[in-house]
Image: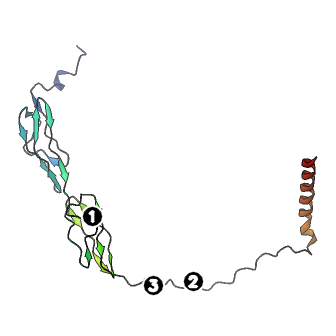
Amino acid sequence: GSTEGPPAAWVRKDNACDAAYILNGAAGTCDDTLASGSSCQPTCDTGYTVSGTSSCLNRTLTSATCSPNPCDASSPPANGAVGTCTGSLASGSSCQPECDEGFYATGSSRCSLGTLTAAACNTNPSPPPAFPSPPSSPPPPPPPKLVTDDDSAAHAPLDLLGALLLACVTLLVQ
């Protein structure tokens, strides 16, 4: 057998395109043998909008796309203002409304596939309860005894260190 090119079963003999698959959508009127010079209309999953039609020309497919729906976040929350929110908030994005004095935002507003989860402005919460005082514990142990001048045994290591230091200095000077 010949080794030039793919097997005959892999080569599309008709002048057509495979338009059966679309990301985040379904084939709609499209199929795997869309004839050259024709177009079809795929559909999109909930939360997505189709960008037009898919078309085929000389075995080259120009495919429609399904884009995530944005949200309208332009309505201010009660007791607040829109802040950074707009009429077209991209899916997967968030914005921050501003709250009137005496109110705080419950977070940011988020858009997911055309569904807005809006932040609210609530009254300031009451202060958190004070931490309970810890149970009484015994007093800490006294600090270790400091070395004093009348403790001659504690000076022996220092005398040795001084002798070594003097010997080193003497060697460096010579």
In the image, taking residue 110 as reference, residue 171 lies left or right, namely right
Pointer 2 local density, CA inside 10 Å: few below 14, some 14–19, many at least 20: few
Q: Amino acid at mark 1?
A: Arg
Closer to us: mark 1 or mark 2? 1
Front: mark 2 or 3: 3
Q: Are marks 3 and 1 in contact (CB under 8 Å)?
A: no
| Residue at the spot of label 2 | 134
Residue position marked by numbered label 3 in the rendering: 129
Q: Which residue is tagged 1? A: 110
Q: Distance from label 3 to label 1 (Cα)?
A: 31 Å
x, y (%) of residue 125?
Answer: 36, 82
The residues bearing labels 1 and 2 have C-alpha atoms spaced at a distance of: 42 Å
Q: Nearer the viewer, mark 3 or mark 1?
A: 1
Q: Quadrant of residue 107?
A: bottom left
- Mark closer to the chain start, 2 or 3: 3
Please tell me how crowded label 1 is: few (under 14), some (14-19), or many (20+) other residues with Cα within 10 Å. many
Element on which disc 2 rests:
loop
Colour pattern:
rainbow
Badge 3 or badge 1: first in the primary sequence? 1
Comes first in the chain, label 1 or label 2 = 1
Q: Identify the residue at image location x=92%, y=49%.
A: 173
Q: Quadrant of residue 7?
A: top left
Give the SS element for disc 3.
loop
The residue shown at (29%, 65%) is 95
Q: Residue at x 25, y 66 (%)?
A: 85
Left or right: where 71 falls relative to 169? left
Seen as rendered, the residue at the extreme front is 173
C-alpha separation, residue under disc 2 versus residue under disc 3: 15 Å
SS class, disc 1 = strand
